[in-house]
Image (cartoon, helix red, strand yellow):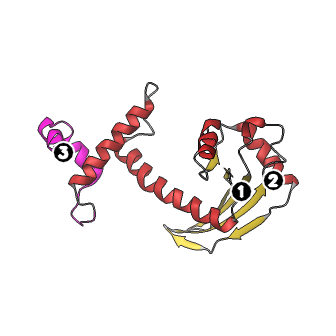
Amino acid sequence: MPKKTFEAAREANATLITQVKDNQETLRKQLEHGMKIQKPIDRFKSEWECAHGRIEQRIYEVFEAEECLRKFPEWKEIRQMIRVQRIREIKGGKISIEEPIYVCNDFLKAKDYAKYIREHWFIENSLNYVKDVSFLEDSSKRHINPVNFSTCISFALNIIRKNFDFNSNKSPSVRGILVENAMKLENVLNFVM
């Protein structure tokens, strides 16, 4: 999560909500410490959802970020931190609890964070799952121009989506289309035309 992203959001007068990743260890530890020493200013508990062979509930807690990040001027744009506790019970009774942390450059209610974070994951799952399963994007080691590689994958996926009806019961999988057509230049050119 580049600091420049927060600066760009401020300049555009946009609200930015983003997850703090494990590779941002210093920031993550500071936020976790801040959440331990203060009480949440808002809280939202979702209903239990039943899907994909599991039941799941999320609890969103919002904290002020200014005090705990005072010694970190590079993160001055962060206004709130959000802890999402995901409680899952899968078939067989196994329970897992995850607690991702999000940060925001604005002041929102916990219920709003719940909505926006869930919308993000819907998009993330629907796009990135297809890109990873069909194009093996996550297992590809692209150290040179990874953005260009990802853009090419998105371009190819858009061409495939334009040319095939995926709502049909008889529609092929994206991976099947790739395997069947990847080595046929005339098919590739027909997709582009």
Q: Earlier in the sequence, mark 3 or mark 2?
A: 2
Q: Residues within 10 Å of mark 3 (few under 14, many from 20)?
A: some
As helix, strand or loop, the secondary structure at mark 2 comes to: helix
Q: Residue at x 80, y 61 (%)?
A: 40
Q: Residue at x 25, y 49 (%)?
A: 160
Q: How far across and down, in percent of the image, does residue 19 sit?
A: 63, 49
Q: Residues within 10 Å of mark 2 (few under 14, many from 20)?
A: many
Tell me which corner region of the image, top left, top right, bottom left or bottom right, holds residue 43: bottom right
As helix, strand or loop, the secondary structure at mark 3 comes to: helix
From where the camera sits, is residue 150 visible?
yes
Q: Residue furthest bottom?
A: 47
Q: Earlier in the sequence, mark 3 or mark 1?
A: 1
Q: How far across and down, in percent of the image, does residue 182 sit?
A: 21, 39
* Residue bounds of the magenta highlight: 167-193
Quadrant location of the C terminus? top left
Is the residue 54 above or below the residue 144 in the image?
Answer: below
Q: Residue at x 25, y 44 (%)?
A: 178
Q: Earlier in the sequence, mark 2 or mark 1?
A: 2
The reply to whether dot 2 and dot 1 touch (C-beta < 8 Å) is yes
- Per the image, the residue denoted by label 2 is 35
The answer to whether residue 39 is magenta is: no
- Per the image, the residue denoted by label 3 is 191
The one nearer the camera, 170 or 154, is 154
Task: Report the Cα–Cα distance between label 2 and label 1.
Answer: 8 Å
- Per the image, the residue denoted by label 1 is 83
| Residue type beneath disc 2 | Met
Q: Is residue 110 left or right of residue 36?
A: left
